Image: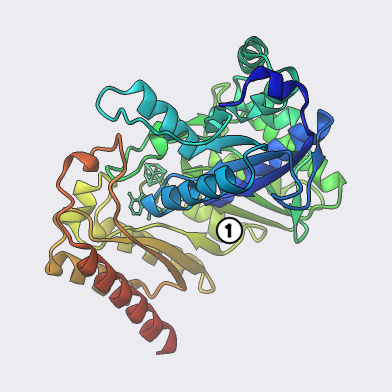
Amino acid sequence: MTSLNKLNKIDKRFFIKTYGCQMNSHDSGLIESGLLKNGFYKADSVADAGIVILNTCSVRDHADHKILSELGRLKKNGPDKKVVLAGCFAKQIKLKMESEKHKTETGLFFDYCFGPDEIMSIPDMLKYENRYVKESYNDDYKDVGLIEEYFSDKKLENGAAAVKITEGCNNFCSYCIVPYVRGEERSIPFEIIYNTVKKQVSKGVQEILLLGQNVNSYLSPEGGKKDFCFLLNALSDIPGITKIKFLTSHPKDFNDGLIETVCGNGKISKEIHLPVQAGSDKILSAMNRGYNRKDYLKLIEKLRNGLSDISISTDIIVGFPGETEEDFQMTVSLMGEVKFNFIFGFKYSPRPFTKAFEIVDDISLEVKKERLERVFQKQKEILCS
Ligand code: 5AD
Ligand code: SF4
């Protein structure tokens, strides 16, 4: 750990390495704007930086391994740099340190550790080198909505801007660490999202990507009926907006009202990401997904009936504990029925704190690899047919 003496001579050039999903890229944008506003400078590479921020993911164990390797490299090649561990893996480390059951001596090399809910403290923490400032700052910015307002200078990608609308998740899918590391679901107040999008439009943005672990359950916190459909319609009415995308949808919350909105509003993107995870009811139930195969297929049918040019992508996990060859075949046959336009496939990996972590991970790595290969092969056949 770095001593305060070392922090006094702070090299203000920073470099952020982002791991994982769109949500993390968005959070890195927030960290970056926070640091730029506070007198720090962007470095061109890790080698040029005095501060290296690893904004981490923790969804699968593969992500953990990447970060551990990076920390090892930094320890070897940049022992004088200040290393800031941020995001989901950082939170996992903190939770492990606090937990009796998962306590591990991490022995990791880093100077600071900020969970996803604490990233707004990074500039002050680095600037004032004072834990007290960090804590009071956190209190001021506890509400994610305020964070959005404060750091509304987002980076733009291809003219599109990402706007976070919810943080955290309450669904507790049995394999998923997200509710533990990102905390309970909070929706950002409607007014703040609306004003953020209007600001973006005034800077020339035409396309918006709305982000949340489960955007479908958005509900503005002030009470009333400002739900996801309301938000989509209100944002699409802003003059200058041409397209609205969103990530990620949960099938259990994709209700008829939302289907109608998506199908009836020409500004809403017709590319829908709808993670199914598995095709067998036994596995879906063990995953605590809140829908069965029939529900999912019905939802797809409704969407396709409403929009012939819809493009549907999905996430699939193979090798969840107890997944028999028969269960796996149900996933493959579901792929055949839906004919997804794109799939993301993953081998199940046990994550600490989750319910599935308690179940024996009884599918061998070989079988997981082989099943994943068959999933990709099936997808190739579907796209070629
Ligand atoms: N093992 C494998 N894949 C996982 N995902 C989430 N948790 C796990 C896990 N423990 C996948 C899901 C999710 C995507 C973001 O990552 O498919 O939709
Ligand atoms: Fe994880 Fe399930 Fe929440 Fe998605 S909906 S973030 S898979 S717990």
Residue 283 located left or right of residue 276: left
Reply above or below: 280 against 153.
below
Observer-nearest residue: 284 or 257? 284
Q: Can see residue 124?
A: no
Q: Is residue 110 above or below residue 124?
A: below
Above or below for 220 versus 128: below
SS of the residue under disc 1: helix
Q: Is 320 on the left-hand or right-hand side of 53?
A: left
Q: Is residue 292 visible?
A: yes
Residue at position x 31%, y 70% in the image: 372
| 78 displayed left or right of 331 | right
Q: Kindly identify the residue that appears in the image at 19 percent across and 47 percent down.
A: 286
**Render colour scheme:** rainbow
Please provide percent x and percent y for residue 195: 76, 34
Q: Nearer the viewer, residue 348 or 294?
A: 348
- Percent x, y of residue 103: 31, 27
Who's the residue at 86% across and 47% down the image? Answer: 203
For label 1, the residue is 264
x then y, percent, for residue 315? 39, 60
Vertical relation: 123 (above or below) 329: above
Residue 26 image-quadrant placement = top right
Q: The residue under label 1 is which amino acid type?
A: Gly
